[in-house]
Image: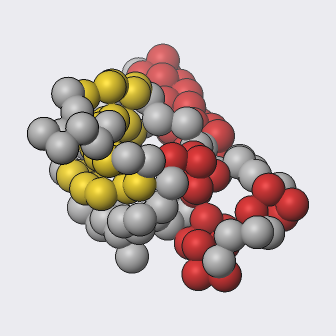
Amino acid sequence: MKGKGFYVALFAVAVLLLGCASSSVRFTHDEIKDYPLDVQEKIIKGEIAPGMTPQQVRYAWGNPDSVLKLEPEKDGRQKEQWTYSSVLGAFKTRLIFIDGKLTYIISTEPGRVAK
């Protein structure tokens, strides 16, 4: 039974370390200083909102797990999908950018929506 406790503790430490890894600094003040104040605040808090650019989202949430170029809109506007997955892959958040602006946030993760 000693071995089982070791693996439980090891798993707990791994989850904690992976959780901490995602909260690392993703930007410097100089990189976001020219954005509107409300966008700067969202980035600092790790929040996103429709209308943000891919770079602003990257500063707020870090790099996505995957990026997929989608078929353009009928009017020719470019469309791209970013996917973020939780540590164990239980939840996913898909972000749709149209012409370089965050347009849709589709998430299975409770509480992970635009603020």
The one nearer the camera, 105 or 19, is 105
Residue occupying the point 74% across, 63% down: 32
Query: In the rendering, at what x and y percent does residue 80 appear?
Result: 33, 35
Extreme-top residue of the structure: 3
The one nearer the camera, 46 or 40, is 40
The one nearer the camera, 12 or 89, is 89
Q: Taking 69 as reference, is 3 left or right?
A: right
Please count the marks in the image. 0
Extreme-front residue of the structure: 75
Quadrant housing residue 102: bottom left
Q: Can you see residue 31?
A: yes
Extreme-left residue of the structure: 74
Residue occupying the point 71% across, 48% down: 26
Q: Taking 2 as reference, is 17 left or right?
A: right
Which image quadrant: the N terminus?
top left
Above or below, 55 against 41 in this view is above
Residue occupying the point 41% across, 55% down: 101
Query: In the rendering, at what x and y percent does residue 90 appear?
Result: 25, 37
Coloured how? Answer: secondary structure
Query: In the rendering, at what x and y percent does residue 48 appear?
Result: 46, 64
Extreme-right residue of the structure: 30
The one nearer the camera, 28 or 110, is 28
Residue occupying the point 18% across, 44% down: 75
Q: Can you see residue 92?
A: no
